[in-house]
Amino acid sequence: MAKKKEQYYLEIQDKKIPIQLFRERRRSVRFAIGKKSVLVRLPLHLRQQQEQVQLQRLRTWLDQLLTKQDGMLEH
């Protein structure tokens, strides 16, 4: 499986959240909370515009998660 991995940070609610972005041979997008960072898995075939839409979905998801469970991302 071809994978490309990138690491960066998102600022959400004054918190710097580490993100690991994987581009893989897959059909769907997946967000998950890992031990040290938030994992984002994207299909290789996504266009730049579609990728930006998914990253905005990630921001919204993380914002909602932090609002509901403030300590969720502390680990």
Image (spheres, rainbow, N blue to C red):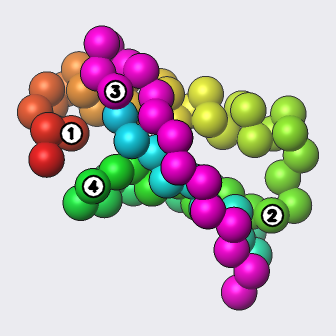
Q: How busy is the neighbourhood of tag 3: few (under 14 within 10 Å), some, or many (20 plus)?
A: few
Residue that carries the numbered disc 1 in the rendered image:
73
Is residue 17 covered in magenta? Answer: no
Q: Position of residue 30 (x, y in %)?
A: 54, 58
Residue that carries the numbered disc 2 in the rendered image:
44
Marks 4 and 1, the one that precedes in the sequence = 4
Label 4 or label 1, whichever lies nearer to me, is 4
User: Tag 2, which secondary structure?
Assistant: loop
Under mark 3, the amino acid is Lys
Under mark 1, the amino acid is Leu
Q: Which residues are magenta?
A: 1-16
Circles 2, 4 touching at the beta carbon (< 8 Å): no
Label 4, label 1: how far apart the Cα atoms are: 9 Å
- Furthest toward the front, the residue is 7
Residue that carries the numbered disc 4 in the rendered image:
36
Marks 4 and 3, the one that precedes in the sequence = 3
- Furthest toward the top, the residue is 14
Q: Is residue 51 visible?
A: yes
Whether residue 3 sits left or right of residue 40 in the image: it is right
User: Tag 3, which secondary structure?
Assistant: strand
Residue that carries the numbered disc 3 in the rendered image:
16
